[in-house]
Amino acid sequence: MANDPFTALAEMLPDEFSKKMLAGAIAALQAQNPLRAHHFATSIRELIGYILHKLGPDAQVEAAIWFKKVEDRPTRRQRATFAIQGGMSDALVESLGIDTADMQKELSDAIGELNKHTHVREDTLLEDAAEIDAFATGAGSAVLGFFTTIEDLRSVLADSAIHSLGSAIFEKFIETTVDDLDILSTHTQIEGLQVDNVEVRAIGLDTITYTVEGTVYVQLVWGSGSDFDRGDGATYFDSFPFTCGVIGSVQKLSEFSEADDLNVDTSSWYED
């Protein structure tokens, strides 16, 4: 299939079940069956429905500040919006340079085409290979665009956070006893840290969950004050990689409420 979007899509799907659904849709498309396009349409439509309900559950969508009730249950568009931005305001998302309008239209148009080809009649049978190829590629590209938009926003948020997370994590190091560091010397002092990489794990109603990778710089001190007076003390400066989780606000991106799961890799200290 020309311009196959399905390989990239398979890598972005949220769980094994959705990957099985996609595999089933592709298998239906590749089968020697005169109704293959229509079986594909049914499978992909079900996949989209599953994804939107999983990533945009009713209660969460309805609690978002941007939600306005238009039907008895959240619409597909609203579920897609929540999957992308959680409880973030539309204005904030736009200020970050993320435009979802084209993606939403492409997804809506694709669903319309899938619905049209789900029910087969003599005058709607899709048989031409080129038309089937274009139809399937369009549907796959629309779903891929949805996931790409999710990744685009999270990438922007991560880039924004990397410049302001340092002080919040530094305070966590100061306040927390890190056993892996403390056992290295009599007195281990945190001198500073550097945030090297930030990944957005989830965007919820009120919070953004980040995973942070970085480097912590320490001063290792052996001996007491009297030891140093006698010339028996010693100090050494070193650095170690660390990871932690950080919780931030969906409305004030420079505010971080807590850091947790702090882990420092000191294995290099013990290497020969």
Image (spheres, rainbow, N blue to C red):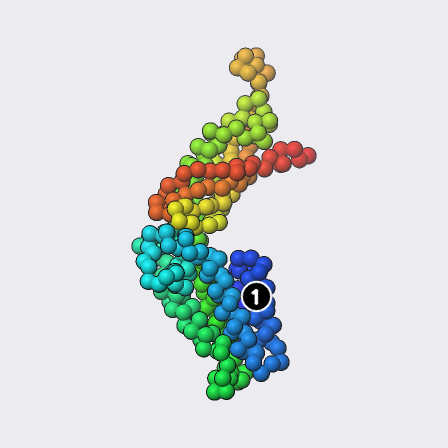
* Residue to which mark 1 is pinned: 21
Indicate the position of residue 155 as horizontal and vertical percent values.
44, 53
Dot 1 amino acid type: Met
Residue 263 makes an appearance in the image = yes
Q: Quadrant of residue 24?
A: bottom right
| Quarter of the rendering occupied by the C terminus | top right
Q: Is residue 76 left or right of residue 215?
A: left
Residue 72 percent across, percent down from the top left:
37, 61
Measuring 34% from the left and 56% from the top, which residue is drawn there?
67
- Outermost residue toward the front? 72
Q: Quadrant of residue 90?
A: bottom left
Q: Residue furthest right?
A: 272
Q: Residue at x 49, y 38 (%)?
A: 260
Residue shown at 46%/38% (left/top)? 259
Residue at horizontal 51 percent and vertical 33 percent from the top? 217
Give coordinates of residue 96: x percent, y percent: 35, 54
User: 209 or 213, which is in the foreground?
Assistant: 209
Which structural element holds mark 1? helix
The location of residue 48, given as percent across then percent down, is: 48, 65
Q: Is residue 235 left or right of residue 150?
A: right
In this rendering, does residue 163 appear at all? no
Left or right of residue 183: residue 215: left
Q: Is residue 226 above or below residue 16?
A: above
